[in-house]
Image: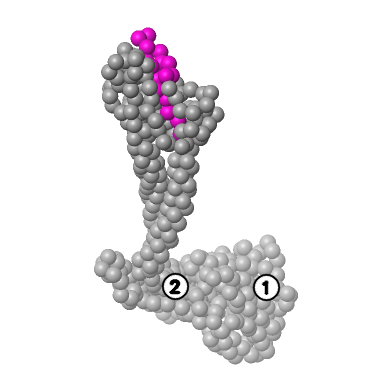
Amino acid sequence: MLDLRRRSLVRRLVLIAGGWTLLVVLVAGIFLTAQFRDAAIRRFDQSLAVLTDDLYAGSTVDSGQLRAPFLTDIRATRAYSGRYWVILDKKADGSMTPVVRSRSLFDSDLMLASSQIDLLEAAPGKTQYFDLRGPQDKPLRAAAIQAQLPGYPDPVVFLAAEDRSPIDADADRFAGTTAIALLILGFGLILAVVVQVRFGLQPLFRLRREVASVRRGKAERLADDYPEELEPLSRELNALLAHNQEVVERQRTHVGNLAHALKTPLSVMLTEASQQPGQLAEVVERQAQTMREQVDHHLRRARAAARSQTSGERTPVEPILDELAVTLERIFQDKGVEIDWRCPEDLAFQGEKQDFLEVVGNVMENAGKWSKGRIRVDAVAVGETRMSVTVDDDGPGLPPEERAQALKRGQRLDENAPGSGLGLSIVDELARAYGGSVQLGESPLGGLRVTLDLPRAES
């Protein structure tokens, strides 16, 4: 069974309207066909009633013998013409014997069933109508009247019948024509419903597109004009967006206050420790520096997680890669590092610029530390909602068993290299906060390949 609750509004409305339209068309077709058939049979019965009345009115009794009137109906003179009449003598035992019959019956008789005889006995003098099987097993429509003629001892039944095949054929043709006409009408109504629904729900489709634009960072709020039924929803959505933005800004303020509150005491501890040489001062300085790095790391992660849950911003990738390449080539100019980067002009990161700078910048800086002079960066779109940034270097690389460990917080695989061991960990945490990932592999240049999977903003 179709679950209409899970279908689209358009499909639901069209199915309901279409089902109701087809039901009404079907009932209308049956009703019209029945009315046409009944009207045709009534006209047919009137013709038969005239014949039975003529038989009844023109029949006479002469010397105890029943004599039929002279009828000018030519069809009743041709054998099996389809128009018949007969006068029946009803005996006391209920049996009926033909007294006079039309030539069209030839060697056949028209006999009544017991239920039809009872119907005539219940209403003598009143014309009754029913169906019979006639000569050559043709369906007949019959009219009969039972009466008592003066001078005749037994009741007499005057019966006229005619082939009803033309009526049935006309009714079938009418039913076929009506069915075709009503089907055309029904499908026309369904098509009109589809057009009406699609046109009527256009504001809802526009609302959906505008909400999607807000989510992708192309707009900050809903600005279109909507019908009065959707205007309250538009206002509520704008209020919700404003509230979410306010919550995010409040969280950022709290994060900044927390960073300031923690960094100031740590700075004091580091200053005091540097002024008091000794083993204890070295331990305090080392641990305070570690605490500062951990605070920076977790605050950075909290800010990225908060930003990733908002409507999002659109950050072009090409100018950032250009800026990073120029900066890092200057930093590592003593090694002669050259950064070859490629990026489509319309590629954009769905997120804040600072986060993208930190993610890609850490990876490219790490490549600069270990490379021998060559770094290659490729940024490409992967589908409509994802993008990939690949950074290759020609350094020593990492064996497979050490790649997972390199992403752990504070891990330094070479204690002689500068840094705190948080670079790739920060990259991994920020990428995960945006629903992405970091993959380490072997570079075609001989060193390490870092592949970033990140959300992509639509062009």
Q: Residue at x 64, y 65 (%)?
A: 403
Residue nearest the observer in this picture, 1 or 362:
1
| Relative image position of residue 56 (x, y in whole percent) | 32, 27
SS under mark 2: loop
SS under mark 1: strand
Kindly give the residue lying farthest to the top in the view shown.
93
Residue 216, which numbered label? 2
On screen, residue 147 above or below 404: above
Q: Amino acid at mark 1?
A: Leu
| Relative image position of residue 39 (x, y in whole percent) | 35, 42
Q: Does the magenta run of residues contain 218?
A: no
Residue nearest the observer in this picture, 106 or 211:
106
Dot 1 surroundings within 10 Å: few (below 14), some, or many (20 or more)?
many
Q: Residue at x 64, y 68 (%)?
A: 440
Dominant SS type (magenta): strand
Dot 2 surroundings within 10 Å: few (below 14), some, or many (20 or more)?
many
The answer to whether one can see residue 185 in this image is yes
Q: Earlier in the sequence, mark 2 or mark 1?
A: 2
Q: Residue at x 27, y 18 (%)?
A: 150
Q: Residue at x 64, y 85 (%)?
A: 339
| Relative image position of residue 54 (x, y in whole percent) | 34, 31
First to last magenta residue range: 82-99
Q: Pointer 1: what residue?
A: 448
The image quadrant that residue 248 belongs to is: bottom left
The answer to whether one can see residue 310 in this image is no
Q: Does the magenta run of residues contain 88?
A: yes
Residue nearest the observer in this picture, 369 or 264:
369
Q: Amino acid at mark 2?
A: Arg
